[in-house]
Each structure stands twice: as structure tokens, then as C-alpha cells.
Amino acid sequence: MLPAKEAESIILGLVQPFDQQLDAEIVELSAATGRILASPVTSQLDFPHWDNSAMDGYAVRYADVQSCNAEQPVELEIVEEIPAGIEPQSTIQPGQASRIFTGACMPQGADTVVMQERTRREGTRVFILEAPKAQAFVRYRASFYQAGTPLLQAGITLNAAEIAVLAAAGCTNLPVYRRPRIAILSTGNELVTPDQPLQPGQIVDSNQYALAAFVGLSGGVPVPLGIVRDDPEALKDAIAQAISSADIVLSTGGVSVGDYDYVDRILAELGAQIHIRSVAVKPGKPLTVATFPPTSKGSKGGAKRPMLYFGLPGNPVSALVSCWRFVQPALWKLSGLPQDSCKPLFVKALSRNDLRSDGRRETYVWGQLHLDSTGTYEFHLASGSQNSGNLINLAQTTGLAVVPVGQTLISAGEPVQVLQVGSRY
């Protein structure tokens, strides 16, 4: 059995990220949310697009108002009103001002905005009651971004803030990495789909649905291939189909040491190189990681690269824990995220419960990770038994607390390392 950190290192070393040209596509801005930029983006627009006011008030010449105060206000003639979206028609001359609103274009000749709370208006005249700072409340063209320079770098995930930036910059067609296709298959004679009535001894295949949700939340495209019976030829055909249609394959079941666990043998028959057979973690000890040689072209016509195969435990809790700990970093790296963004995210937290283990393997216990009012992370153990057969209390999990090898107890109030689980998008 490999230690978890060693297994993680091996897995990430096997992943070849998407190619900036061969694995990229152009999408419209409206469809870009959650996608990862494949190439740097530049804009032909300065930002701000023009000199504009950051405040409702009056656009003035600083030279006219630099010495005024409430006892000796400066009186100026109002020559124009400039709402946002309207081009100014006047040039400010000495002794003049324009009424201006937030976001409106600065008129020629003006270099400072006096906020309206520091003025008194009488008809077409305005009295400046307090000297502003030079260039106060003016946002100058290109002060935030200069046209033609890099706007966003490759490898960035496009979330709400990035979409806002791209829209403001007029970038409507974007180069993004395609979403990785992840084939999912479940093995076992005992499995049935959720819509089938259960017969004695049968088990509902929740893994197909859980892994599809996991893949989608991680930025991939799930390719569900259904249930495969414990028949070597059927399993071989299903795995062959999976590796020909996806970038990563996830199978559940068949990777332990039972009489019906065929996966490792079939992988070898299909030409795979097996890198990992088990990991010293609980839950999730049975874990097969293999690669297949590159085909003539990658999935969906992308760059050719070794196909990565994960044989996960059939137990639903163990399968999800294995995905959070080992599969998700691989999926992120393949997707084009920067190397330093792909590793599992562990945070230090205070445990609010006693956390127990037998000490023989690195143990993950599930629960909720919260930030308290002081900014300290707290880990709250899920209620009920911490048993890999108890799928029910896995709901609402946001963290996996780690009890290290050789340690049997982390007491309530003690610090603990917690793996944050869920989407990084």
C-alpha cells in the first residue's frame, strides 16, 4: 500500500494537461462561465474607456477652486449638465463648471470633480465651499487597463468577476479548454438502477449518479456507461469502449481481492500499465490507477496523451472519498488549471468532536467545515457512525478531517488538518 501523499504525487505526475491549441475551442461570452482560458486574452478597449467622474458633483478646473473655503467660496457658471452616456458638448473655461454625474465623461478643460455635498447651487451658478484635491474623483482613461496588454492569463477559471471584466472589455469570443470527458461505469451483479424495484440481495447503483455529479461539479463532462455485470468479457468490452471515448475512466467495484474482482487482470490484457493497486487510507484502500498508451488522437480530436484509468472501490462512501482525495486533482490538472491550483486544499481547523481511528492507515472522517466569527476554521463531525457503509450521513459534507497514521485520537478542541471537498469553481 502506498502512502496517500506518494499516491497523489504519482497520479499528478501521470497527467498531461490539455494542449493550448489542440484541446481548445472558442465559445461565446454567454457560454463561458466556469470554463478555463486556454490562451491569454487582450482587449482593444482601454478601461476606463474615457476620463469619467467617480462622483455626482461638478467638473471644474482645479486652478479655479484650489484656494476656496466656506467663508470665501468660489462662484462658477454652470455651462452644461452631463449625465452618464452623453458626450460633453462644452469645453470648460476659467470661471466655468459642468454639472456631472457618476460615470459621465469628463468635459474638455476640466481636471477635477467637486462632490455635490461640498457645493451650493443657485440657478445657473454654483458655489464651491471647500477646496478639493487636484484631480479628485476623476477616473482617467486606461488607468485600470491599457488596450493591447494582457487582460487575463491562460489557466484562469471564468467566474462572475472574470465574466464581468471580459464583458466590460468587449471580449465576446473566448479561447477555452474543452471540458474533459470522464467515462463512468459500475461493476457488479448485485447492482440495479434506482428506478428498479429491489430484490433480496440487490443494491442500488448510487455510484453512477454520485460520480456523474462529482465530475460535473469539477468541470468535466460525465459519460455514464451504466452497470456492467461480473463477466470478464462484458467487463473487457465495457472498459475498451470507455477508454476509446473519454479522457479519464472511472470504474467502481471489482478492484478488491474477491473472486469476482477482474479489473486489474482485464486492464493488463488491454495493454494498461498499472501504477497503483492500493493506498494506505481509510476509507478507500482499494484503488487501481493505470494508464493506457496514447491513441492516434485524443478524445474528441484533442491532443493524444496517455489515457488515465481509476479503478475505485465499489463502496459509495469509499468511491467518493477516493474521488475527492485523488481523482479531483488529476481532473483539475488535465483541465488546464495551473499546477499550483491542482493539489488538494488542506486547511488547519479546530475539531469540535473527538476523532478516532485504529491508527493503521491515514483515516478520513467526514463532516462540515465552518469559519467562526474570528476567522478560525472549525470541523464538525457528521452525526451518526463514521462507517464506510453509512452513505446517509455523507450528505452536506464539506470537509474530510485527517487522522494520521499511528494516531488513534484527535480530541475535541485540538487542531486537525481538513481536506476541503467540493468544487473549486
Image (cartoon, rainbow, N blue to C red):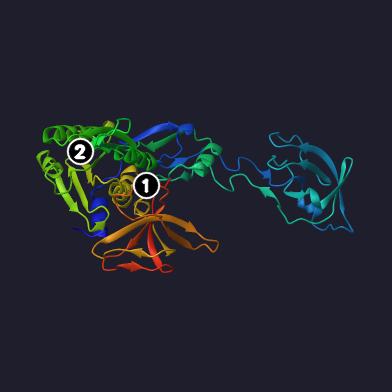
| Between 275 and 367, the one nearer to me in the picture | 367
Which mark's residue is nearer the viewer, 2 or 1?
1
Quarter holding the C terminus?
top left
Disc 2: which residue:
188
Name the spot of residue 6 as percent of width and height, x first.
24, 58
Q: Give above or below for 237 relative to 414.
A: above
| Between 223 and 49, the one nearer to me in the picture | 223
Q: Secondary structure at mark 1?
A: helix
- Residue at 19% in and 33% down: 238
Residue type, mark 1 in image: Ile
N-term mark: 2 or 1: 2
Residue type, mark 2 in image: Gly
Disc 1: which residue:
392
| Between 264 and 174, the one nearer to me in the picture | 264
| Between 23 and 279, the one nearer to me in the picture | 279
Q: Quadrant of residue 9?
A: bottom left
Quarter holding the N terminus?
bottom left
- Residue at 33% in and 37% down: 209
